[in-house]
Amino acid sequence: MSETGENHKPRDGGSIADFTKALVRRLQGEHKLAHAVQKELVAIARNNQASQRLVHAAVLTLLDARDFTDAVDIATRSFPTIFGCEAVRICIESSGISAWPTDIMSLPPGEARAIMGDADILLRARATGDPALFGAEAAAIHSHALVRLRLSPHADDALIAFGSRESGKFQASQGSDLLLFLARVVEKCLMLHLR
């Protein structure tokens, strides 16, 4: 109050108490938002750490491969368990080599490029399973990740295909660094055993 007994009011007609309440509400809102962002960042970091552990486990398992067939077997039989997906397949265009192990999905020449275009990785949240990629398990596939492999001059092109029955498991918005890294390890392991 002033000496005349009147309340001081800002020139726009609101009281200082109203301004303080508005400021407190605004700060509380910003605090809630900051807290929500912090929780999301922690969840992302935990998810990334869990993904790293899975990739490390897959790589260590693959390093035990004794030969090409064993490496393919590890990728197609162990990786689905490690990553919690329905199927993992190695798909190779078959121009010139006809004696791939039975777990290899044989693609006609040019098919990998037709599927992938120029991309090295393709993540689809909703996808109908392609029998050319997933064989008998194709009907159960509703989401997939495809990564290009370059194995040798004898194989025109190749892919590693991860398929999940869970729609949305693989999404274009996901980070793909770990999946690309795993594909490069698979590629190098297979190439080593092709020599």
Image (cartoon, grey):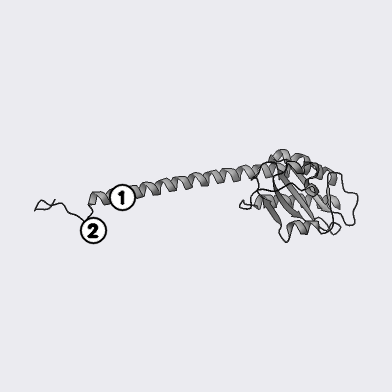
- Above-or-below relation of 5 to 74: below
Question: Picture coordinates of residue 175 (x, y %)?
Answer: 62, 52
Q: Is residue 110 left or right of residue 13?
A: right
Residue at the left extreme, as displayed: 4
Packing grade of label 2 (10 A; few <14, some 14-19, many >=20) is few
Q: Are marks 2 and 1 in contact (CB under 8 Å)?
A: no
First in residue order: circle 2 vs circle 1 = 2
Circle 2 residue? 12
What SS does tag 1 mark? helix
- Mark 1 sits on what residue? 22
Q: Residues within 10 Å of mark 1 (few under 14, many from 20)?
A: few
Residue furthest to the bottom in view is 118
Q: Can residue 63 be seen by looking at this rendering?
A: no
Above or below, comparing residue 106 to residue 110 in the picture: above
- Residue 192 at x, y percent in the picture: 82, 51
Please name which of the two marks, 2 or 1, marks the residue nearer to the observer.
2
**Where in the figure is residue 179, as x and y percent of width and height?**
68, 50
> Is 40 placed left or right of 50 in the picture?
left
The three-letter code of the residue at mark 2 reads Asp
* CA distance separating discs 2 and 1: 15 Å
Residue 123 percent coordinates (x, y): 67, 51
Q: Of 106 and 48, which appears nearest the observer?
A: 106
Helix, strand or loop at mark 2: loop
